Amino acid sequence: MTDFLKQTIGRRAVLGAGLAGVSMLAMPSILRAQEKSLKVGVYGGYFKDSFDKNIFPDFTKATGIAIEAIAEPTGEAWLVQLDQAAKAGQAPADVSMMSQVAMLKGQATDLWAPLDMAKIPNGSNLIDRFVNKYPDGRVAGIGAVSWYITLVTNTDVYKEAPTSWQAFWDPANADKLGLLALVSNSFLLEVTAKTFFGGTNALDTEEGVQKAFDKLAEVKPNVRLWYRDEAQFEQSLKSGEIPMGQYYHDVTGLAAADGNPVRSTFPKEGGIQDSGCWALSRASTKVDEAHQFINYMSQPSIQAILSRKVGTSPTVKRELTDLTDAEFAAVSSDIEPIIPRYDLYQTKSDWLNQKWTELIVG
Amino acid sequence: MRREAPQKLSDYGPLFFPAMMLIVFFVVPFATMIAVSFFQRQQGGFYVPAFEFANYERFLSLFFANVLGFSLMLAVTVAICCIVLAVPFTYLLTRMKRKVQIVWLVALLSVLSLSEVIIGFAWSTLFSRTAGITNLLVMAGIMSEAKALLPSFGAVLTGMVYQAFPYTVLVLYPALVRLDPTLTEAARTLGASPIKAFFTVVIPALRNTITATLIMVFIFALGSYLLPQLLGRPQHWTLSVLITDQAIYQSNMPFAAAMAVFLVLVTLGLVALTVLAGRKGEAA
């Protein structure tokens, strides 16, 4: 620090900067290239740091479009801000990474500008479910990243990896589980439906949801911790204090690689696959740049970089990427995933939330 | 110094700044919250201005009554525990040498610098099976095997008392320092034991201070929402936890606001009752 303070700006440096400035003015083409820019909203913290480091500089190099990354809060606060701003004709970010429930809520107010798939040729690489559409077929968003929540265990306590989500219901696991505390982020209703009632279609009716709730109530005595804060569970899982639960596949893999006695298992019913979409605010004026950006992000090579550097599962078909088996297994699985019923969290959110809170608090 | 009632408008000048602050940072947000609590929730969207009681109706159920009851009970228990511990502690502290007092007060003040998150995680480690205090008891041969002391009501209570204790001492300290030592000396010369003098002279002399401190700790504890999550089971979650869920995770601002307004009203009611009861006691 002191060394830094001692440094003085030399005469040469000043001259150099001046020269550079003059030559910039003399070359309007460079300035014009700089004018092309795009504000991209990414979850603050780990995601934004990784994107700033591994993705955005290469994109600017490839297209000449400067990226201004905006750290967006998780939860729905960002959706509220985008919506309010769009009503005033403003776009705090042109393209944002949005959760699936936020996508549906934004659709309800026509917040997302429809995307022109003709301008996104790489869109054909995507797995179908990662193209988010309005009910009338317009494209509202394109899958940005996806990640898995799986069945995790402490290897000291469980020598054998469990094979099914049914382990949560096993009376032998009394007071041993750590589960996510909210109906809309634990996706345990979907897990219950897939494990016991043949699939998430069982949640189509209220009676079906009720049956899943009743089944889920049997898990309650096994749960030691309902967590909102990830650090809380991760620490307990590593120490064996809470030896089983649901957690993020890639983070668990990293913890295991650091020598912690933990493992992540894809149960035979499938891991829970959650994802985020790129969506364009209708107030944005950078429509072309946004399409270029989304097209760039949908390349198999970029998705492979994301898998290696950020730990996300590719949104493009596996065979298009050059991921090795080990690299793919670190972030994903070929077992058919459990896809959350996002529609329920939009249309029945209050009812589900009330039932859920009564289930775990009551 | 003689105090005069303000004569001119400019005499009210010094009040202007605090009043503005109070309006901008308290009255306006609070009024907004009350307004929002009557708005209409758009499921799957946000909310629209309206005037309806649906949010309050939803709150009036056995389920929320239980949660509210638990929150109040927890806050009262924390307040009583803090007072029971802090009054004798502070009394003894004021009898000590000046230097010792300063060391204690600095230590207590440093606890205040810890955030709720740090306190929560520290206690969850102390109460854990793998690294907790029961391991010490096992080493000492008192227990046969280490066990987890959380999640439990006791853990929540411990964490919250720990957090509120420094405030309690700091509020009680000035009153106890100013307490005339000749009062206890008189009691002692009249034959009372130190303990008897403490309960028959010191405590009654401090009654108003103790009531005020109880109310302060009670309100402080009522707002706690992190420690019950970190140290307790879902049945130990306070109403503040559910308000956070609604506001942050469900984007149901109207319902969250209605719950918060209800909590404030109940709190004010209880405080008013306490003050009234105190006045009656004094008159008698």
Image (cartoon, grey):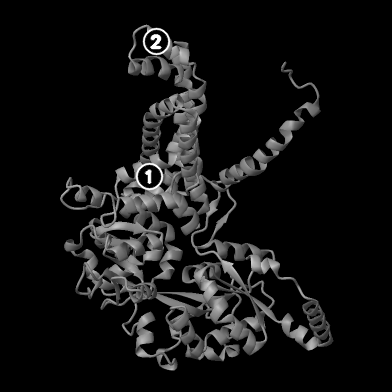
**In this rendering, position of residue A141 left or right of residue A236:** right
Going 20% across and 62% down the picture, which residue do you hit? A173
Q: Is residue A286 above or below residue A169?
A: below
Q: Quadrant of residue B16?
A: top right
Subunit of mark 1? B
The tag on residue B159 is 1
The tag on residue B187 is 2
Nearest to the observer: residue A259 or residue A170? A259
Going 45% across and 49% down the picture, which residue do you hit? B116
Going 23% across and 56% down the picture, which residue do you hit? A221
Mark 2 residue crowding within 10 angstroms, few (<14) / some (14–19) / many (20+): some
Q: Quadrant of residue A194?
A: bottom left
Q: Is residue B135 above or below residue A69?
A: above
Q: Position of residue A197 (x, y in %)?
A: 25, 71
What kind of residue is marked 1?
A: Gly
Q: Is residue A199 above or below residue B91?
A: below
The tag on residue A47 is none
What kind of residue is marked 2?
A: Ala
Q: Secondary structure at mark 1?
A: helix
- Quarter of the image where the N terminus of chain A is located: bottom right
Q: Position of residue B119 (x, y in %)?
A: 41, 49
Subunit of mark 2? B
Mark 1 residue crowding within 10 angstroms, few (<14) / some (14–19) / many (20+): many
Q: Position of residue A114 (x, y in %)?
A: 59, 79
**In this rendering, position of residue A21 left or right of residue B271:** right
